[in-house]
Amino acid sequence: METNELLKMIDEYFDGELEKSKDQNLFISLSADEQARNYFRQNRLLKSVTSEMQEAFPEEVEKKILSKTVLNGRNKFLSHRMRTVLAYAAIIGLFCTSLFFYSQVRTYKDDINQVHLDIQKQNRTIQILLNSLPTTEINGKYSNAVIIKSN
């Protein structure tokens, strides 16, 4: 039997997944392969140590751990719920603020449009006044004549 197949069978044996009919083939193959026997010993030692650790770990401690986990899960749920409520409140607050600023901007826009119309009206009035003035004519007189003489 190939070494990789044998190591796989050893893993299945310790996991409790090896069929009973293959047990005998496993032990026969172990007698022929030194590396597989060492691997079997290491797994057996590991299994015995872990089983001792499981026995040393009281069920009460496990219950406490699980109860703390459940409580933390509830606290996380509440904090998640609280964060959701706060997020919605912030969204509503920002929406109301944006509506307020929008109305203010709209008011300022209307005021600016009115000022623009007033300025246009005043410009038209000034143009009418300027055009209604009589035309003036300016004639210039030279009072001091410049005389140039040659030598």
Image (cartoon, rainbow, N blue to C red):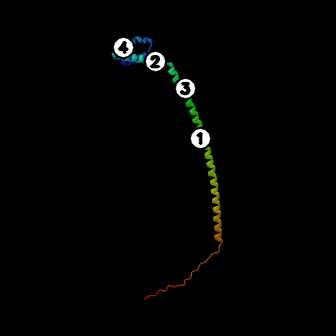
Q: Residues within 10 Å of mark 2 (few under 14, many from 20)?
A: few
Q: Cα distance, mark 1 to mark 4?
A: 70 Å
Query: What's the distance in space between the residues labelled 3 and 1, CA to CA?
Result: 30 Å
Question: Of 82 and 13, which appears nearest the observer?
Answer: 82
1 or 122, nearer to the observer: 122
Q: Residues within 10 Å of mark 4 (few under 14, many from 20)?
A: many
Name the mark on residue 30: 4
* Residue carrying label 1: 90
Disc 2, SS: helix
Q: Earlier in the sequence, mark 3 or mark 1?
A: 3
The numbered mark at residue 56 is 2
**First of labels 4, 3 by sequence position:** 4
Q: Residue flagged by tag 4: what amino acid is it?
A: Leu
| Residue drawn at 60 percent across, 38 percent down | 88
As drawn, 105 above or below 21? below
Element at badge 3? helix
From the viewer's perspective, is 65 left or right of 1? right
List x then y, in percent, for residue 42: 38, 18
Q: Could you tell me residue 90's position as x and y percent? A: 59, 41
